[in-house]
Image: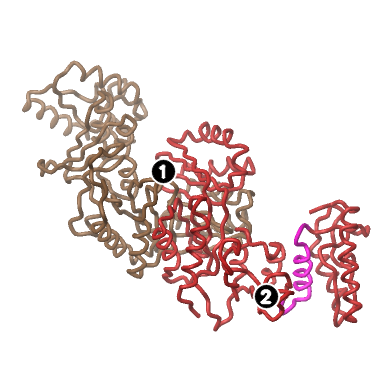
Chain colours: A red, B brown
Amino acid sequence: LSSNPKRDYTASRGEYLTAEILARYLGYTFVDPAWCICFDENGQLNMAMTIRTIRASLLPLKHAVIAGFYGADMAGKIHTFERGGSDITGSLVACALGADLYENWTDVSGLYAADPRIVDHPETVSHMSYRELRTLSYMGASVLHSDAVLSASEMEIPINIRNTNRPEDPGTMIVRHLPSGVVKNPVTGVSGRKGMSVIQIEKVMVSDGSGFSALMLDILKKRALPFEYCLTGIDSITLVIRSDLLDSCKDDLFEEIRETLNPDFIGLREKQSLIAVTGEKATEASDANVQVLERLTKEDIEISTINQGAGKLNLLIGVPEERYEDAIRAIYDLRQNMTRRI
Amino acid sequence: LSSNPKRDYTASRGEYLTAEILARYLGYTFVDPAWCICFDENGQLNMAMTIRTIRASLLPLKHAVIAGFYGADMAGKIHTFERGGSDITGSLVACALGADLYENWTDVSGLYAADPRIVDHPETVSHMSYRELRTLSYMGASVLHSDAVLSASEMEIPINIRNTNRPEDPGTMIVRHLPSGVVKNPVTGVSGRKGMSVIQIEKVMVSDGSGFSALMLDILKKRALPFEYCLTGIDSITLVIRSDLLDSCKDDLFEEIRETLNPDFIGLREKQSLIAVTGEKATEASDANVQVLERLTKEDIEISTINQGAGKLNLLIGVPEERYEDAIRAIYDLRQNMTRRI
């Protein structure tokens, strides 16, 4: 978050004026978020105070227009949220008022089932869960700010992503549990990222309770080096790390791993990509993930790592970067031919 | 290791006498391991001293018979290895002398591709790597003591498991790299264990470098609670732990996880089993693992977790305990119909 009041003040004036003009045009009351979106002097949102002040400002009103993305501290100095902050303002208002629905009007007709830069005219997903949205956002779909999703999901307020340019489109509805009767594709969406490195560490008797994996993750934690995922196996650990983060510390890190863990083998595969196939699954046998793996094999795409946790929400797979687009297209094509279930 | 010299002395006399009788029958020199398998007074093997003394004892001889599973400390007190210790003695002798081959004569004609208690007359594997053997041993195949494999693999001495009752069988040859020309099934063997518990922990923004997974593994390390494997995903961690180890500390552990990590959700699935499908893979695309998943899906067996690390040596999957035998049989059946490669 920025804590530069002067810059933030300047940045907020366009939003302020636009909202005031819109309010006058509609004949609604204009509400300045400087009154009710409460920051502290360091630019951190005070959530509890914000909830109370939004209620105080808006509950007496029948209609209101509130400006986005900024607020103010006790001294009245303006602070802004980071990019995408108007989503947060909208979500805060919806949460504070216990809204039935948070409509977020943007420039797309909802969330795509795949990256439109890779797949031609991908389908818009009609319904998805907060968890599914979080995964897709984490992997790069940037329709909605993640903090906005977080607060709405905590309050279980449905979010509807709508397109200002095509108001007739129903958009995407984001909820905790899908309403009954909604026909659901087993694969909600496919997303991913290139620029991944896969580290493979082997050591005899890793899985003996000596905490080899814990030591490995401690090394990463001390360096504040995040990893995409970690798989431990028999005598082996696999780590997927963003190459841009790894490259600056690779030699150091490998040296530390060698000294601390004395592994039998360290391998590094670069130019890998990570693909998440996302879809809430029933607990019973579901073969959608297996179908995905089958399809990639048929396309002769090497699958370097496979990771499906007990939640079954995501199938995470590693494929070589050069086949990333092929893999996304193949999975999307498979998705479009999958049997939907109610 | 036992450190009870009196009991160990008694236990070793049968082996001592048998070896001495065999030596006389063959006309070979009898070598008492009390001279050359060197323990310290606590019953720990002194490896370096043992290597030197074995060489000193055996290099002058053309043929010798050495008794198994015991040795002695400096004071001459007898100490024994744990169960399976004669494998260790044999491996130590092979390593000390830099043998071309370590033949281990036992009561089976080698390692089976699947558990013979589940699969009728499973195939004996003709060749496998040390790594494959380690996996199969870890998962329950107990033909050879793991320390014996470890020292032989470090010295790259091939191990040949042979059957005393069927000396005409070639047995299993265990090597670092398969000799060229050997026809290899992509699945060397399938093994597994019942009695597993799967813990699923969810928390928004796990993968942000804050070390959530590291904290989780630290909790297990502090408790010296070993886990079979750990998968981290987006917002989730999956841990597979032996139920007998978990049961004694489950409530405590979950309480600590809740307090330390404040997760959004903790789930526990009991009566799970863990299956390892083992086979050295080429780096290029290999679809054997995908075929296994396909087959289990066709048999309507739920796959709760999938774990294939970058080494691709093992595909580790979780299936409900009640379908464990079905799964092993299905994978073995698939294996028998797989295309072998040279």
In the rendered image, residue A53, in percent from the top left (x then y), is placed at: 86, 69
- Residue B132 as seen in the image, left or right of residue B172: right
B334 to B129, vertically: above or below: below
Residue A112, by quadrant, is bottom right
Please report the residue visible at 25 percent of the width from the left and 19 percent of the height from the top: B55
Q: Secondary structure at mark 2?
A: loop
Residue shown at the point (7%, 27%) measured from the top left: B26
Which residue is tagged 1?
A235
Q: Tell which residue pokes out farthest to the right in this image.
A: A75
Label 1: chain?
A: A
Q: Is residue A88 magenta?
A: yes
Quarter of the image with the N terminus of chain A in it: bottom right
**B157 to B289, vertically: above or below:** above
Label 2 lies in what chain? A
Q: Position of residue B182 (x, y in %)?
A: 23, 42
Instruction: Compute the Cα span from label 2 to label 1.
Output: 45 Å
Q: Nearer the viewer, residue B83 or A229?
A: A229
Tell which tag, 2 or 1, sits nearer the viewer: 2
Q: Can the viewer see residue B6 in this picture?
A: no
Q: Is residue B314 left or right of residue B12?
A: right
Question: For the residue marked with disc 2, what is the amino acid?
Answer: Pro
Secondary structure under tag 1 reads: loop
Image quadrant where residue B177 sits: top left
Range of residues picked out in magenta:
A82-101
